[in-house]
Image: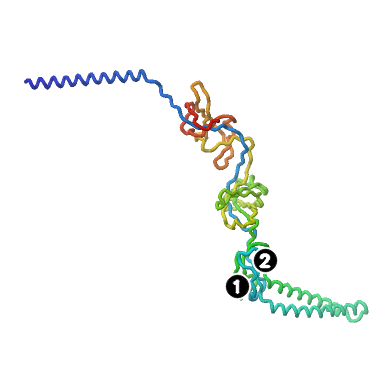
Amino acid sequence: MKNSDTRKRGVLSLIATLAVSGCGTAQAGGIDGTDSEEFVRIINVEVSRIETEKFVEEIRLTAAAVANQDVMVSAEESGVIREIFVDKGAQVESGVPLAKIDDRILTAQVEQARAVAELAGQTWERRKRLWEEDRIGSEITYLEARFGAEQSMAALRGLEERLARTTIRAPFSGVWDERHVEIGSMVVPGQSVGRLIDLDPVRVVAGVPERYVPDVWVGAEATLAFDVFAGERFTAPIHYVGSTVNPRNRTFPIEVMVPNPSRRIKPEMVANMAVTRQEVEEAIVVPQDVLVRVEDGYVVFVIAERSEGTVAEVRSIILGPTRRNLVVVESGLAPGEELIVVGQKSVADGDRVNIVGGRQ
């Protein structure tokens, strides 16, 4: 019986202790709620002062280099190659002999034709004097002698031209890039003997989307950058603008001529081309990274001073032309304002901010 009373007194003591502890906790929470201060969020940001500048909008294209002239030089007479004057890779001038075809048969034919032409010429001179001065002979004999002399001379000139063509010459100045024959090779008219390339200047061609037809014309400035020449840029006016649009890709061709005296630019090298589309004077230009996308367009945040301190102020903007990572702001910003460029994704209109960089 005594043990049972002892257990009852222990349980009642534990319940009383828990009840007192619960009341103490509730009382402490109420005190904290009454004495606590309101939390104010301050966000660190970096800013940039807005200034106007000249902005050039560009059309970005992928282009490829093409030789100014690139031909397969062909034989114009039949025969065996007897001499080769130029090794491949050599720079040659227009008219320089490249190879020689055996000309012994044609040389003999030319000598024979020259003798015939000389005889016909002398016969014509004598017939002419007899007929025109002494009226000796007949008119038909006179005419036959005249046309015989002319025919002989024409045959001689034709053979002399064929003889000259046995020497294969460079049709223009360039690089003798390939050679397709060796001494002893048999060639016929039209057969290629080598490849001649003119690389100075070099043409750079690109296809422009048809929506830019009003913005591209002969003389417009283009800038080129080849990946293999890191950091180097070439500037030249557009030399040619195509008159038709390719129905397969809806582009029209343009060409730029680039000086290439050292022949560093080689055919089929790829280049990034930028064509000036328009220029905007006194433009407000900002990086596209500072823009914040919203339902009805884009906004940015600027610094404003209010009674509560320095805050972020939202601005709705209208965008203009772009170039790489830059965009023109046509309305919504003014020169001299401070634009938030770091931390703009973390602020809302009216948020307190602390400027940690960019202010001058």
Along the line of sight, which residue is nearer the eye, 213 or 220? Answer: 220
Could you tell whether 341 is left or right of 175 in the image?
A: left
Mark 1 falls on what kind of element?
Answer: loop
The answer to which of marks 2 and 1 sits earlier in the sequence is 2
Residue at the front extreme, as displayed: 360
In the image, residue 106 sits, relative to residue 56, either above or below, namely below
Could you tell whether 124 is left or right of 174 in the image?
A: right
Examine the image and state in which quarter residue 79 appears. Answer: bottom right
**Residue pictured at 62% horizontal, 52% vertical:** 253
The residue labelled by disc 1 is 182
Tell me the crowding category of disc 1: few under 14, some 14 to 19, or many 20 or more residues within 10 angstroms, Cα based. Answer: some
Q: Please name the amino acid that badge 1 sits on.
A: Glu
Q: Please name the amino acid that badge 2 sits on.
A: Ala
Can residue 183 be seen in the rendering of this structure? Answer: yes
Residue at the bottom extreme, as displayed: 137
**Residue 168, image x and y in percent?**
67, 70
In the image, residue 151 sits, relative to residue 267, either above or below, namely below
**Residue pictured at 69% horizontal, 71% vertical:** 165
Instruction: Measure the C-alpha gap from mark 2 to mark 1.
Output: 17 Å
Mark 2 falls on what kind of element?
Answer: loop
**Residue 254, image x and y in percent?**
63, 51
